């Protein structure tokens, strides 16, 4: 995709609305003077669009952070809840992401996939004893790993529809058919946007390489890769990609299990799905 | 370096017989370097009396740093008389609001509208400049260096550290140290606490070893119990900051609007009794008193 097209996409994404349930919840919670801080934070951090817009804003040079802020919780500690709340309200005022786009990409199913990937990614991080900050970063990386897809569905629906259809009919990886019809894959689009928004290096890498494990060493990305496959294996939502990738040797070595083994080892994953659904359904 | 409080009251001006001693104007601090450069922090109603005092110095060069744009910190700007007088140069410094994306010029322009004020912005005779400051990026004014840091409040708020002539002052603006929003039994509690602790360390470092630390201490602990999240500190949170930062003098300001001189005096006495060994001198901010560092 040409640079001018990339620039156009960046401008379009600025106006991208958030998911319906979180828009509704933010409006409701910000109208209630007794709403609890943790309820507000929970709604924001479960919506990829709100999360990304807040991280983008807080990580800009105007707020001079010594380290990148990688989660909504850290943004709250840095600048205060009310500012974050009002930023979320600003996103809510842009309207709601339409569930019925021309690409026939079901955004509710997509959000269920993203949210369950986020939660499982965090579980995996906890399982291999990463620091609490890394665990929280794994949630964000899982939530945002497929962000490029919802951007395609919103702004390039015709091309994305063809990519989705061919991927499904011929059982090809979606990122491959995206390249064919759009000229850029969701990982490349996600990387470009994440770089533009000054997100952290590890987060950018996790978004960029969650289908290409050999290109870098990044434990955060490994958690997202594994969680992504687990979410698909468990049939939690729909990411648009029909293929489930087996755990390669590096991932088996990292987590000590293959894909079916890990799904069993993590215990009752249905509760993760149920919790995620409660944030999605109107 | 020396400084003077022209406004010490929080939220709203409180003139009257009960506030004669400490003063009823909202926040304004005048700082003078040894070369007599003029730095003003915040433009609450106290800036009007400061302006009267400056008339004998015309023309002036004033550097006004705004901690945040809540009304009580900007409402004196249209009454800062030097803005109407030719040959004065006034620079107003502040951050970009992440919600509105507006720069600090809005703090004045929004007040100089037909419905709210008789004079238009275009009619101001002084030369007025606006400068966007960024946390951690120092700004020079004469021999002084002013460094902002983001401090939590319900709107973007900067604390400012002023280093000059081998001395230093830090003013928090309005600041409530972040509390953990989770309960100890929540999964997120420990993680959130690590963010809170990291931010606390960053704040303490920014005010390390200052000669004068000026803090928002609106509430007593008893009052704070029902005012968490309102964006203001307590006397005790101020002492905790000063002790951690090894400040030499601690000034309590942003006096709660219903606080009378008598109640401030009583609070001060009990602070002295309860904190005999803080290692720093405890003082209540009081309008009109020159403080030489």
Image: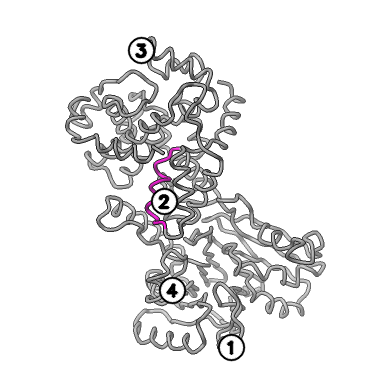
Do we see residue B4 in this rendering?
no
Q: Which residue is mark 2?
A: A40
Q: How far apart in space, not on screen, are marks 2 and 3 (Cα)?
A: 40 Å
Viewer-side label of 1, 4? 1
Vertical placement of A141 versus B211: above or below? above
**What residue range appears in magenta?**
A35-48
> Judging from the image, what secondary structure is the residue with disc 2 in?
helix
Q: Position of residue A41 (x, y in %)?
A: 40, 50
Closer to the N terminus: mark 2 or mark 3?
2
> Judging from the image, what secondary structure is the residue with disc 4 in?
loop
- Number of numbered discs: 4
Rendered image: mark on residue B20: 1
Q: Which residue is mark 3?
A: A171
Q: Position of residue B232 (x, y in %)?
A: 46, 68
Instruction: Please indicate whether residue A267 sits to the left or right of residue B34 in the image.
Output: left
Instruction: Please indicate whether residue A66 sits to the left or right of residue A274 in the image.
Output: right
Q: Is there one chain holding both mark 2 and mark 4?
A: no
Q: Which residue is mark 4?
A: B247
């Amino acid at each position: 995709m040409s640079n001018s097209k990339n620039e156009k996409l960046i401008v379009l994404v600025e106006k991208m609305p958030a998911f319906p349930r979180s828009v509704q919840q933010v409006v409701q919670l910000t109208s209630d003077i007794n709403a609890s801080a943790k309820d507000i934070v929970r709604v924001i951090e479960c919506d990829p669009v709100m999360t990304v817009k807040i991280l983008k804003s807080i990580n800009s040079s105007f707020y001079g952070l010594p380290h990148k802020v990688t989660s909504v919780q850290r943004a709250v500690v840095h600048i205060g809840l009310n500012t974050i709340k009002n930023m979320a309200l600003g996103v809510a005022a842009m309207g709601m992401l339409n569930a019925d786009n021309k690409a026939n990409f079901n955004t509710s199913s997509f959000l269920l996939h993203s949210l369950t990937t986020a939660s499982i990614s965090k579980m995996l991080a906890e399982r291999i004893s990463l620091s609490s900050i890394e665990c929280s970063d794994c949630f964000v990386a899982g939530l945002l790993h497929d962000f490029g897809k919802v951007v395609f569905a919103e702004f390039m629906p015709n091309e994305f529809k063809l990519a989705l259809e061919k991927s499904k009919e011929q059982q090809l990886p979606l990122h491959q058919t995206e390249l064919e019809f759009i000229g850029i894959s969701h990982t490349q689009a996600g990387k470009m946007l994440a770089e533009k928004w000054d997100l952290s290096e590890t987060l950018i890498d996790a978004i960029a390489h969650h289908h290409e494990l050999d290109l870098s060493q990044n434990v955060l990305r490994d958690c997202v890769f594994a969680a992504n496959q687990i979410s698909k294996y468990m049939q939690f939502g729909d990411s648009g990609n029909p293929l489930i990738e087996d755990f390669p040797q590096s991932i088996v070595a990292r987590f000590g299990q293959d894909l079916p083994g890990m799904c069993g080892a993590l215990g009752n994953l249905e509760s993760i799905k149920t919790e995620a659904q409660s944030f999605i359904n109107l | 370096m020396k400084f003077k409080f022209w406004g010490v009251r929080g939220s709203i001006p409180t003139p009257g017989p009960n506030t004669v001693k400490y003063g009823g104007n909202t926040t304004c601090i005048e700082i003078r370097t040894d070369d007599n450069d003029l730095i003003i922090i915040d433009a609450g109603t106290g800036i009007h009396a400061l302006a009267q005092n400056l008339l004998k110095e015309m023309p002036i060069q004033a550097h006004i740093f705004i901690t945040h744009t809540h009304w009580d910190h900007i409402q004196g700007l249209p009454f800062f008389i030097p803005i109407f007088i030719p040959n004065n140069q006034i620079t107003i410094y502040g951050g970009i609001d992440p919600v509105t994306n507006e720069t600090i010029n809005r703090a004045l322009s929004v007040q100089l509208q037909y419905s709210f004020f008789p004079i238009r912005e275009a009619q101001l005779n002084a030369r007025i400049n606006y400068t966007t400051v960024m946390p951690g990026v120092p700004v020079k004014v004469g021999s002084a260096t002013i460094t902002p840091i983001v401090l939590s409040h319900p709107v973007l708020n900067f604390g400012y550290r002023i280093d000059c002539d081998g001395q230093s002052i830090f003013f928090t603006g309005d600041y409530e140290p972040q509390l953990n929003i989770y309960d100890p039994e929540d999964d997120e509690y420990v993680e959130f606490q690590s963010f809170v602790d990291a931010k606390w360390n960053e704040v303490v470092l920014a005010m390390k070893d200052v000669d004068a630390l000026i803090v928002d201490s609106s509430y007593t602990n008893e009052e704070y119990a029902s005012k968490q999240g309102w964006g203001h500190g307590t006397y005790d949170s101020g002492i905790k900051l000063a002790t951690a930062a090894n400040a030499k003098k601690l000034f309590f300001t942003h006096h709660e609007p219903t606080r009378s001189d008598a109640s401030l005096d009583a609070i001060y006495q009990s602070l002295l009794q309860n904190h005999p060994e803080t290692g720093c001198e405890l003082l209540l901010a009081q309008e009109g008193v020159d403080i030489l560092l």
